[in-house]
Structures are given as structure tokens and as C-alpha cells.
Amino acid sequence: MQPVVELITRKCAVQWAIRQHIPFRLVALLRGLTLASILALAAYYLATSIRFVPVSPVVFAVAIGLLLGTILEIPKSISPGISFSTRRLLRISVVLLGFKISFQDIASMGGSGLFVDLLVVGLTFGFAVWISRKVLGPESRLSYLIAVGCSICGASAILATAPIVKAQNHESTIAVGIVTLFGTIGMIIYPLLYHTGWLLGLDQISMGVFIGASIHEVAQVVSAGFAVSEQTGNTAIVTKMVRVMMLAPILLCLSWFLSRRKKPNDTAEAAPIEIPWFVISFVLAIALNSTPILSLQIKGVLNQAGMFLMLIAMSAIGLQTNLGRLQQIGAKPLYVGMILTGFLFCIGWFATTLAYSGVPAMFR
């Protein structure tokens, strides 16, 4: 079936490149980008068409890429474009994510909401790394991916962390699958528990903080929040965006930790600290978004561009993922995801009720 992929990429990229007199060394790059872009468009179409379950387009992108990469033999001639997508475009998409957040979001939360976010992210990340390394092994890169995915913002955080920990594509795919699965479960269960009266000590505002601080993906937070009320949904979105903002300090600390942990060439000196440029750019994008310089139209274009670039990157990651490696890892990551979801629920509820009601109701 290899000619199918060859036909798609050749007709869309190679012939056009030749007509435009583009150097031949760019042809392979364009072919890979074209294929990943087509898959990204398909993922976006599926996500917007299936409305009864709010599944992120990112999930469809990696699933379509994984399926196509498993069924068809992807030609080596498109590898440069695929690699470019999983590296450069991925980092650019993380930078553009900063234009969804502003420092005003932090101010609007107040001290109580910020306390909840800081406590949940800090404790969840630390516990997630510890339990993941216990279950998956002390040298597992997957532990860091699952930790940031659960504690911060799901797939976006995973993709931003992957180049820092030098994760392989199949590890990113597993981590995205875990946060999607358990985040979707939380998206369904949280509103049910609230409406049936099982979540003690939470009103509509504090319920929004609880949802935003403990459910993985932004789309899942939006769905769960507005399933309770409009006020809960708006509060959940702001809480989640502030949680996303914590991605930058977490990645910088992780980069510092990994650089100090390993020693190059077995020398006594620590490895130099690698400061990811895209994390610094992410912070600068937040700062720029906090000013009135950019219009709403420009911000909207940047947000859409960032999402589409992330879909391209995830499609490329799916294409490069080795399905056999996924089968070798087994069910252990699922156990970790289940434990972390329970931990997030408990610590999120405790921190929210402590911040908004004092001592949680069950301890009075």
C-alpha cells in the first residue's frame, strides 16, 4: 500500500514544488508536512463533527496517524517532513499556546483559586513522578510525561515536555492516551457527583475551581464545568488557564533537574543547564497577550494557528510511533493513570474546600 501514501504526498507537494522552482532538498520536507497536514485536517473535522462527546482534536490526530502508520508502510522519503513536524512545529505550537493566557487571568482568580492551583499542581506533579517511577522504573521517561499531563494540561503539556526529557514517540502516545481516557471519565463523573449532592462543601464557584484544578484537558474542563452551570464553566476555564500557565516554571525546573542529575562523559561536573527556548517564548507570549497591543482578531488567528500546528505535530508523532513498542509496555501506565486520577480528585476537592469553606465538611 506504499504507493497510496506516495501518491498523496507526491501530487500535493512534489509537483507543486517543482513548478514553483523550490530547491529539491525542500521537496522531502514538503511531502511529510503535506501528509501530516492532511491528517490534521481530518482530525479537526472529526472532532468538530462528533459533538455528543467532547474529544480533543489532538486525540484524533494521534489516533489517525497511528492507524495509518500501522496499516501502511510510510516511505522514508517523507521522513524529513515528519521529523520537522514532531520537533520544530511542536515547539512553535507550544509557544502559540501562550496567547490563550494572560496575567489578568491570575488576578481574576484571587488568592483562594491561586492557592488551589499551586497546591494541586505541585503535589500532583511530585506524587505522579514518584508513583510512576515506582511502577514503571526509575529511568522511565514516561513518568515525567504522565506527571505533567495529569498535573497541568493534558496533551499540550505532554508534547511540551517530550523534547526536554527526550521521550520517544510511543511514550508520548501512551501518555496522551492515559490523560484522555481518565480525563474523559472525570468529565462525566464530576457533574454527576455535584448534582447528586456527593461533593460536600462546594458551591457553583468553588465547583468550577475544583473542576479546573483537577481535570486534565481544557476541552474536558469546559464540558464538565458547563454541565454544572454557566458560572461554574466560566470559573473552571479561568482556573484551568492559570494551571496551564504553570507549565513554564515546571518545564524550567525539570530541565534544570535533569541537567544536574546526569553527568556528561562520567566527569565530576554537572551537565550544563538546557533552557528550552520555546518555554521562554511561551512566557513572552503570555506577557504580550497581557497587553493591549494585539487585537482580538490577531489573538484568535494565533490561537487557531497554534492548535493546527499541534494537530500536525501529533499526526506526525502517530505516524512515527511503533505499535509494537506500545504492546511491550503493557498495562502498567493504566494503573498509574488510575492512581493519579484518584489522587487528583482527592487533593483537588480537599484544597478547594479548604480554600473556600475552611475545614472540609467531612472533617468537621
Image (cartoon, rainbow, N blue to C red):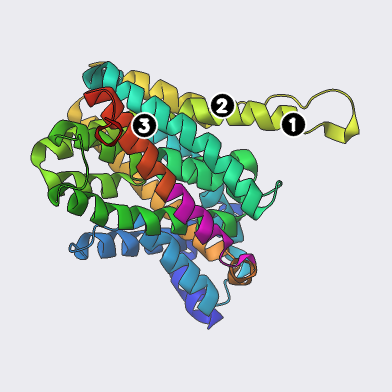
Residue 249, image x, y percentages = 50, 25
Mark 1 crowdedness (10 Å alpha carbons): few <14, some 14-19, many ≥20? few
- Chain-order first, disc 2 or disc 3: 3
> Where does residue 188 sit, x and y in percent of width and height?
24, 56
Q: Upstream in the sequence, badge 3 or badge 1?
A: 3
Residue 238: quarter of image:
top left
Residues 39 and 77: in front is: 39
The amino acid at mark 2 is Leu
Q: Secondary structure at mark 3?
A: helix
Q: In the depicted view, which residue is nearer to us: 34 or 83?
A: 83
Task: Write down the residue under mark 3.
Answer: 243
**As displayed, is residue 361 above or below residue 162?**
above
Q: Is residue 333 magenta?
A: yes
Q: Residue furthest left?
A: 230
Per the image, the residue denoted by label 2 is: 252
Q: Main secondary structure of the magenta part?
A: helix
Against 250, residue 150 (above or below) is: below
Q: Nearer the viewer, mark 2 or mark 3?
A: 3
- Residue 261 is tagged as 1
Is any part of residue 294 visible from this angle?
A: no
Which residues fall within the magenta stretch?
329-341
Q: Are marks 1 and 2 in contact (CB under 8 Å)?
A: no
Percent across and percent down for residue 5 are 49, 74
- Marks 3 and 1, how far apart in space? 27 Å
What residue is shown at x 19% (from left), y 50% (from top)? 191
Quarter the C terminus occupies: top left
